[in-house]
Image: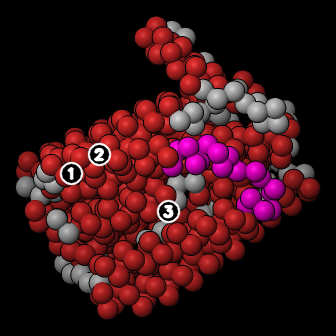
Amino acid sequence: MTQAFSKQVVFRSVLMVTGSTYVNYASGLLVSTLIARSLGPADYGRYSYLVWLCGVLIIFFTNGLTTSGIRFVSECLGRGDPGVAEDVHGWLQKGYYASLAIVTLAFCACVRWLEPAGWAGHLWVFAAIALISAVAKAHYLFRVSIAKGYGLFGMDAATTSMMSILGLLGTVALAVAGASLNAYVLLFAAVSLGHAIVAQVLSRRARIHPRHEAVDQVLARRIRQHLWWTIVLTMVGALTNKSLETFLLNKWAGPEAVGFFLIAAALTRGGIDLLCSGLNSVLMSAMSHAFGVGGIERVNRILIDALRYFVFLGLLLAGVGVLWANSVIAIMYGAKFSQAAFVLQMMVLVGGLTLVEGAFGAVLSTTDNQKARVAASVLYVVVTAVTAFSLVPVYGLMGAIWAHVLSRSIVTLAIAIGTTRMLRIRLPYAEIARLLGAAACGALAALPVLLVSSNLVAQFIAGIVYATAYAGSSVLLRAWHQRDLQLIGSVATRIPMLRAILQRLERWMRAPAADTPP
């Protein structure tokens, strides 16, 4: 099982998960577009609100169990204790079933206040669909998280790819038939159930099963401590990840504003997943395995490289996203959804610039510093609550945008400062500065295109120019190390064209300094 966490295998897993994400994202975009164009802004706002609410329920159902599963299953395997890993699996599974019961009761008690604005159907239908969908997706997430702890990242990729394609086919059929909101909601529930069924089948084939023997008291104490802080963190996250803004928009601005806001949120999330899903999927498992093998020093080596990759991808997302936002909304959703374009520009900009939060969050979870993440997230809740309750009732959609921008920026800054000081990490400032310089070069290259014309075609071309100039400038400015090239080369040996390109790029790579970890 150690072989599953070697550098080459981890990098191949990144590529595999990223590739499946492309399939999922493409099908998800088509599904969103078809449903939005079929239903219109109001009913689409109600549909997207239901999907969002299911996402919040999933967070409460799984809370910190998925994160702790990845962390401690990987760590036990890193220490050569597969039996203990099965015991951890069984210990966490009991907590998962308990959370299902508690959250379901709480949801049923509060469902009257959570109903989408203007919902025309029976309240019990809404509640049943929300619960069935959320429980099924939670079941899927718990299983694939345990599988990731074993280094089996393909289970998640296979499940999501299969169900995304089936969901797309179902959506096309409903759109052709001119189906109503209720039909799309039932399809969403069916696809969610499919996730759970496929994940369960694949888990059995991989022979991943829990063992219900007692966990060592020292390890159990560490799991409880990690789980407690992770639960608090995920609960806080459920209230901060655009949740308060969405809830308030539903109450104060109506379903159309909810639709615009969640369209932008979904496109931003999709863009981030396209760029970072592979890296995010394996980062915590790789860090946990490294922590089990060599402690904090090995983890910090992974973190320094991850930070450089996240900064590069974040600047790419921010630049291209801002330039493409108007074109994407106009082509996909049409003129009725034009208000979502500015929301998307703001979200993708702040999302790209704060992408590094994922790396800092992973290392805090891996090194038993969940308390620091919780402190930053509590600050996030406070800022989000103050800004959202102050701005959304008065300014509607614009208030929700600025509440999100302020809260997201503050929490990322707090996590970055706290993590570097706590773990005494020396950030790769030189490489980050070079990447910022490359982004500036990309912006300067795109500017002439916009000066000639500012129509949708020109904005799309400007985005391509920015991405090309940015990537090329990052090489010319020597923002990369030789070990980055070696890592890519480990999976490119069978592709002659790619191997030749890598050889040409080698002279632009920086050799590591004497005190830089390999």
Between 482 and 248, the one lying in front of the other is 482
Res 161 → quadrant: top left
Verify CB contact (< 8 Å) between mark 2 and mark 3.
no
Report the residue marked by disc 2: 446
Classed neighbour count for the residue bearing mark 2: other residues with Cα under 10 Å, few (<14), some (14–19), many (≥20): many
Dot 1 corresponds to which residue? 450
Q: Which image quarter holds the C terminus?
A: top right
Q: Name the secondary structure under disc 1.
A: helix
Mark 2: which secondary structure?
helix
In front of the other: 308 or 280:
308
Q: Position of residue 33 (x, y in %)?
A: 19, 53
Please provide percent x and percent y for residue 256: 21, 74
Q: Position of residue 104 (x, y in %)?
A: 51, 72
Q: Position of residue 157 (x, y in %)?
A: 47, 36
* Residue drawn 44% across the image and 47% down it: 439
**Residue visible at 22% across and 42% down in the picture:** 461
Magenta part of the chain: 419-436
